[in-house]
């Protein structure tokens, strides 16, 4: 465990973004009970997603990333939904591994962020309804996107986003079949929660990192004050109480209990957007020995942040190294 002692940042939120928890309290949070049909619900979705032919296509991109060839990517997800994004290839060697990156609800305009490995191919999809994969009638505004079809358990938008990740693995293996067994995942915030929901059923991903993941412990998420997408969920469930049953099937902390891959998590002690109790419920539910990196804050600027982020990149460089062996 890294970085366990940090003072609380100064803030002017009308609520406490630590929610009254210290680290010991966060490490004691347990996931909610699992719905009876949870495993069968997700296993069927995964089997169905594997039948999709992603037909990936690459073209020259106007975007650039130092040390990488940047290509525009599109592929077909479940139900034929068109997913667009990027593929980055190292310029000086064949990729030793494939890393799929899941973005946050803030979206991604271009793949210009720091990367932990220079020997990886990076598949960076935009999840359905967001960024390059925007499509009517899905709103790209997080407060509307997160409640799209929330009253329909089998059609809720988060399920489609999980399928976009699974079919992204299929697309990467269509392009580079020799990377089978060498694929990892990095997901932040929204992409972290999607990753937690996807990983238990996806044996083609060998190890994964989740950074301040969302969608953990839905009962708490429906109660804790937040400036993030959880506030929209709270409003929707107040007007449509039956939607709580849908959320129980999309609980990243419940899913985490079925994750079998080695995991690295970066979790915040203070976060006004994704409450830390939900983040830690995901980590606490995971079986086995997993790596935990403590962040002073998530979705919030704090002193020493550039140095802490550089340290995290170093940790991830080492964490994903076994994929190159």
Image: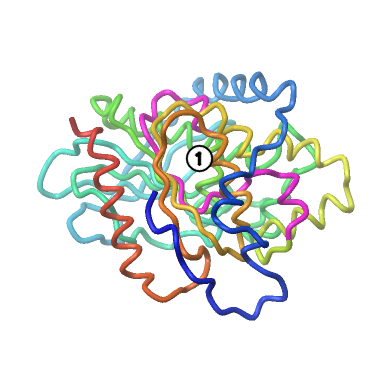
Quadrant of the image occupied by residue 274: bottom right
Query: In this rendering, is residue 227 above or below 68?
Result: below
> Is residue 125 in view?
no
From the viewer's perspective, is 68 left or right of 316?
left
From the viewer's perspective, is 316 left or right of 268?
left
Which residue is rendered at x = 33% and y = 28% of the image? 174
Query: In this rendering, is residue 131 above or below 89?
Result: below
User: Colour scheme in the image?
Assistant: rainbow
Q: Position of residue 243 (x, y in %)?
A: 82, 42
Q: Position of residue 72 (x, y in %)?
A: 34, 50
**Which residues are drawn in magenta?**
198-224
Q: Position of residue 164 (x, y in %)?
A: 51, 38
The quadrant of the image that shows the C terminus is top left
Total count of labels:
1
Q: Residues within 10 Å of mark 1 (few under 14, many from 20)?
A: many
Name the secondary structure under disc 1. Answer: helix
> Is residue 248 in view?
yes
Residue 200 is inside the magenta segment: yes
From the viewer's perspective, is 295 left or right of 149?
left
Furthest-front residue in this view: 24
Return the residue nearer the eye: 188 or 143. Answer: 188
Quadrant of the image occupied by residue 207: top left
Residue 99 is inside the magenta segment: no
Residue wearing tag 1: 195
Furthest-left residue in this view: 92
Which residue is rendered at x = 10% and y = 48% of the image? 92
Q: Position of residue 318 (x, y in %)?
A: 24, 44
């Amino acid at each position: 465990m890294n970085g366990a002692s940090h003072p609380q940042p100064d803030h002017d939120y009308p609520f406490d973004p630590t929610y009254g928890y210290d680290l010991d309290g966060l490490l004691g949070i347990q996931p909610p009970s699992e719905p009876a049909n949870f495993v069968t619900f997700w296993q069927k979705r995964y089997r169905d997603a594997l039948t999709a032919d992603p037909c990936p296509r690459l073209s020259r991109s106007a975007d650039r990333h130092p040390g990488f060839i940047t290509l525009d990517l599109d592929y077909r997800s479940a139900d034929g939904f068109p997913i667009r994004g990027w593929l980055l290839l190292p310029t000086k060697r064949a990729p030793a591994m494939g890393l799929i990156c899941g973005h946050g609800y803030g979206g991604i305009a271009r793949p210009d962020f720091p990367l932990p490995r220079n020997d990886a191919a990076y598949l960076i999809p935009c999840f359905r309804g967001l960024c390059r994969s925007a499509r009517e009638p899905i709103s790209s505004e997080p407060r509307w996107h997160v409640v799209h079809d929330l009253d329909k358990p089998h059609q809720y938008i988060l399920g489609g986003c999980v399928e976009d990740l699974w079919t992204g693995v299929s697309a990467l293996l269509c392009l580079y079949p020799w990377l089978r067994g060498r694929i990892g995942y990095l997901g932040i915030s929204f992409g972290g929660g999607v990753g937690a929901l996807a990983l238990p059923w996806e044996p083609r991903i060998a190890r994964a990192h989740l950074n301040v993941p969302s969608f953990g412990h839905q009962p708490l998420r429906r109660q804790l004050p937040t400036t993030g997408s959880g506030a929209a969920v709270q409003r929707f469930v107040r007007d449509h109480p039956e939607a709580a049953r849908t959320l129980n099937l999309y609980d990243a902390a419940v899913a985490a209990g079925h994750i079998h891959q080695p995991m690295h998590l970066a979790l915040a002690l203070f976060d006004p957007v994704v409450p830390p109790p939900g983040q830690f419920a995901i980590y606490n539910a995971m079986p086995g020995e997993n790596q935990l990196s403590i962040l002073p804050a998530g979705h919030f600027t704090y002193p020493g942040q550039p140095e802490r982020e550089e340290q995290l990149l170093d940790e991830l460089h080492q964490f994903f190294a076994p994929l190159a062996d």
